[in-house]
């Protein structure tokens, strides 16, 4: 088949060459076309041919028109051969169609999945249903090789097999011999004097291999990774005063066997400069003092390009607050080479004021436009305000619906005082299956899961069904939240739940505690970051005594009955100015909640306060703190209900201890919680080795302290439990996953230890 196709290709070339000679070799006297017939069509529609002919029935035919017709039909790319024949006044168009690609298959491909390769070939024009062309098949083979070279598989070979089938179709099979990937065996940096080779090589995203290379593939050459490495190298020098640092050249050498790669980077460090001063120049709108306060460049310290970039960005953003969307601030260095000092002149040109014409949103395939637009604080037809745009972006990010958000300012052609904001979002799956698991000698393996949809039907509403199938703790809970129950942002939450807990098997009891109820809560936003919640609920709690019931439960039931009804009224406040709800790196979250039960036979008050603080200590490192305090008591002559107790221990609390087992114990050994709670957590989040700046996969070290106390117990620091450990945080397709290995460092006899814990869908 290959030979026959090559003959067809040759015939095509002969036909094309013949076009130039047609007028001289097969000259036909002009005539009026009485009819046009087409012969040889199989799949191509006759209308496609007729539309390409420069003449119609009843018009005059000439050799020039015939030559143009043949050229146009060949230009369609559908035919291997085209001839024009004349029978009287009838013109016959004889064509030979190109074969059509019936199927594309791959053999020997392990590095790529089939869909990736099919997409790559489709982009160059080779796909099922399209005409076959040998030149296109050759391009496809080269494209496959390019794909493999991008993965450092320089020895990959591609063989194309063409198999003819019925109805003038062909199947294409690309057989790939991948070979072994080329490894980086040597990296040399030439020209460095101020810093050692080892220090500079640690900055690069490519290396000669390590214990995690099987996962990171950092020893495989990639032009993208090399460019990122060069930028990291340049940034390192420019942060340390080397104002004139440059990378002269980069050589990448591949061994003859295509298995080893050597990289040589030639640099010129230049002299190190110290900042002697900073001067403002240009138009600062008469607010020089405000702009000076934004300068982070410190005289007397080495020149730092990051500080310069940070200052320029802060200034342009500040100009944007006044509507100057096109403001430019340029840092001009005035170098004194005799003393190796540099004075920076910050020249500003605010340009013209602008207002926003339109806000265009793209990328939201599932999420409705209104869900994004209602978070915008920058309005259309109002003055451009960079602070409002930044807050709008943070609010959209805090929704948790998108993997990436980019807002671009675009000038409106012909309107120098107008801009459009193009908002591009990349959606992520918002439905999740939340899993929890733990193993202990008492409960063995405990499992639970939550089906959650944070963006139900693209409306921004939250739906959740929580099921726990544990032998000892069973839960069914349904929750729905409408964040914009009213147009001005008042939210409404509805909750219905049923929970039943039983003692551990090794405690020899079969009593249970069952709670059924529902709640309605409204959230009223008072500022951009402050929301106050008002709620009311109804719940019924039943104590089933069974055997070996804790004395605290039995005492409460004997005094107030085995069934208790409560009508809790809740009032809470939340302030959230974090940069992201999913992967925060800066900002603070605070929650203050008060609960009052005074309208039924259960009478109590209960309050809690939580604060989370995120501090960026470097570009990819974040320090996080969490603190929780809870307190409750009974009203009048009634004690604090035992089934309203606080609990601590486990993920989200004090890691290294079994979930909810800290605090007071009954004489039976059961953990019954307490009316007072204190938990403190600290975490240092770092990049996962080899993952670069990917915030969705991080390592963290942590220290936890906390406990719960009875209503008559004093809160004593000496009674706090503590643990330290390491963990992994991953934004998985099922939701945020956190795996922790903790070593308790302060324990008491009887504490239930659980060193390894994981959960999907929790923080701290």
Image (cartoon, rainbow, N blue to C red):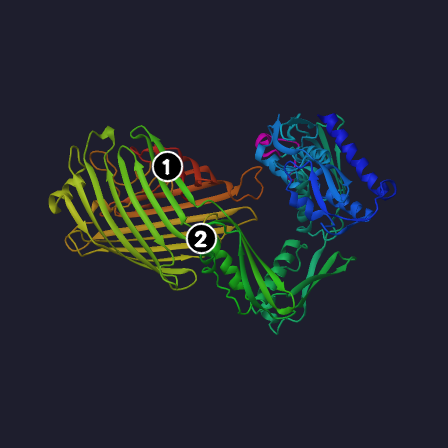
Report the label total. 2
Q: Which of 705 and 39 is in front in this view?
A: 39
Q: Can residue 206 be found in the magenta stretch? A: yes
Q: Which tag is nearer the camera, tag 2 or tag 1?
A: 2
Q: Quadrant of residue 113?
A: top right
Q: Can residue 764 be found in the magenta stretch? A: no
Q: In this view, does 66 lie to the left or right of 144?
A: right
Where residue 436 is drawn, which disc sits there?
1
Could you say whether the residue bearing mark 2 is in a helix, strand or loop? Answer: loop
Residue range in magenta is 203-217
Q: Give coordinates of residue 428: x percent, y percent.
A: 48, 46
| Earlier sequence position, callout 2 versus callout 1 | 2
Q: Nearer the viewer, residue 245 or 27?
A: 27
For the residues marked 2 and 1, what is the alpha-carbon distance in whole angstroms?
24 Å
Q: Give coordinates of residue 262: x percent, y percent.
A: 73, 33
Q: Which residue is drawn at 38% across and 59% down?
A: 484
Q: In this view, does 14 lie to the left or right of 234?
A: right
Q: Which residue lies furthest to the front in this view?
A: 88
Please name the residue that numbered disc 2 is placed on. 399
Q: Which residue is drawn at 80% across and 45% down?
A: 67
Q: Give coordinates of residue 300: x percent, y percent.
A: 66, 58
Q: Which of 620 and 271 is in front in this view?
A: 620
CA neighbours of label 2 inside 10 A, class few (<14), some (14 to 19), many (20+): some
Res 255 visible: yes
């Amino acid at each position: 088949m290959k030979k026959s196709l090559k003959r067809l290709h040759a015939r095509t070339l002969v036909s094309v060459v013949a076009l130039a000679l047609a007028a001289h070799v097969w000259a036909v006297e002009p005539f009026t076309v009485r009819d046009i017939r087409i012969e040889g069509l199989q799949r191509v529609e006759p209308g496609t041919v007729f539309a390409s002919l420069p003449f119609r029935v009843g018009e005059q035919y000439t050799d020039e028109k015939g030559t143009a017709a043949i050229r146009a039909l060949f230009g369609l790319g559908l035919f291997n051969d085209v001839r024009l024949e004349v029978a009287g006044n009838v013109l016959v168009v004889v064509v030979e169609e190109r074969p059509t690609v019936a199927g594309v298959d791959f053999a020997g491909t392990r590095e790529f999945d089939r869909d990736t390769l099919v997409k790559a070939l489709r982009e160059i024009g080779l796909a099922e249903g399209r005409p076959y062309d040998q030149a296109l098949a050759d391009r496809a083979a080269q494209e496959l090789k390019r794909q493999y070279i991008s993965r450092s598989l320089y020895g990959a070979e591609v063989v194309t097999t063409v198999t003819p089938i019925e109805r003038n179709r062909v199947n294409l099979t690309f057989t790939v011999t991948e070979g072994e990937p080329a490894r980086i065996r040597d990296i040399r940096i030439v020209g460095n004097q101020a810093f050692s080779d080892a220090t500079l090589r640690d900055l690069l995203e490519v290396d000669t291999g390590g214990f995690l290379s099987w996962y990171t593939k950092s020893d495989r050459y990639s032009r993208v990774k090399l460019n990122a490495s060069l930028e990291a190298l340049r940034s390192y020098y420019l942060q340390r005063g080397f104002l004139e640092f440059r990378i002269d050249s980069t050589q990448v050498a591949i061994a003859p066997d295509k298995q080893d790669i050597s990289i040589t980077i030639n640099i010129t460090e230049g002299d190190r400069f110290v900042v002697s001063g900073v001067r403002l120049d240009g138009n600062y709108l008469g607010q020089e003092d405000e702009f000076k306060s934004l300068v982070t460049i410190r005289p007397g310290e080495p020149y730092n390009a990051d500080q310069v970039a940070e200052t320029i960005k802060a200034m342009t953003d500040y100009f944007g607050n006044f509507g100057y969307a096109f403001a430019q601030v340029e840092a001009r260095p005035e170098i004194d080479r005799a003393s190796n000092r540099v004075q920076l002149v910050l020249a500003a040109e605010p340009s013209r004021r602008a207002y926003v014409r339109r806000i265009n949103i793209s990328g939201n395939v599932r999420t409705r436009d209104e869900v994004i637009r209602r978070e915008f604080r920058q309005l259309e037809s109002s003055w451009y305000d960079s602070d409002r745009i930044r807050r709008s972006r943070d609010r959209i990010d805090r929704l948790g619906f998108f993997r990436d958000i980019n807002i671009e300012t675009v000038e409106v052609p012909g309107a120098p005082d107008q801009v459009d904001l193009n908002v591009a979002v990349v959606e992520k799956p918002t439905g999740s299956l939340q899993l929890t698991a733990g193993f202990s000698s008492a409960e063995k393996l405990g499992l639970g899961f939550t089906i959650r949809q944070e963006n139900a039907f693209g409306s921004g509403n939250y739906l959740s069904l929580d099921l726990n199938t544990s032998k000892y703790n069973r839960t069914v809970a349904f929750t729905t939240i409408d964040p914009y129950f009213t147009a001005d942002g008042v939210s409404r939450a509805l909750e219905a739940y049923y929970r039943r807990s039983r003692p551990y098997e090794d405690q020899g009891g079969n009593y249970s505690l069952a709670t059924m109820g529902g709640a309605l809560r409204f959230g009223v936003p008072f500022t951009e970051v402050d929301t106050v919640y008002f709620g009311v609920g109804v719940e019924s709690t039943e104590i089933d005594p069974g055997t070996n019931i804790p004395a605290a439960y039995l005492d409460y039931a004997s005094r107030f009955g085995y069934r208790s009804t409560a009508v809790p009224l809740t009032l809470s406040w939340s302030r959230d100015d974090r940069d992201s709800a999913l992967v925060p790196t800066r900002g603070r979250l605070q929650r203050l909640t008060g609960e009052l039960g005074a309208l039924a036979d259960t009478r109590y008050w209960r309050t809690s306060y939580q604060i989370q603080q995120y501090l960026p200590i470097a570009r990819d490192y974040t320090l996080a703190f969490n603190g929780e305090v809870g307190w409750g008591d009974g009203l009048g002559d009634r004690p604090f209900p035992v089934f309203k107790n606080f609990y601590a221990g486990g993920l989200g609390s004090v890691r290294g201890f079994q979930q909810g087992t800290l605090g007071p114990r009954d004489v039976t050994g059961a953990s019954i919680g307490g009316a007072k709670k204190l938990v403190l957590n600290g975490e240092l989040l770092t990049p996962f080795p080899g993952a670069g700046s990917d915030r969705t996969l991080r390592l963290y070290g942590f220290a936890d302290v906390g406990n719960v106390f009875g209503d008559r117990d004093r809160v004593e620091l000496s009674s706090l439990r503590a643990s330290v450990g390491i963990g992994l945080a991953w934004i998985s397709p099922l939701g945020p996953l956190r795996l922790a290995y903790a070593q308790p460092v302060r324990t008491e006899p009887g504490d239930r230890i659980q060193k390894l814990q994981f959960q999907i869908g929790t923080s701290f």
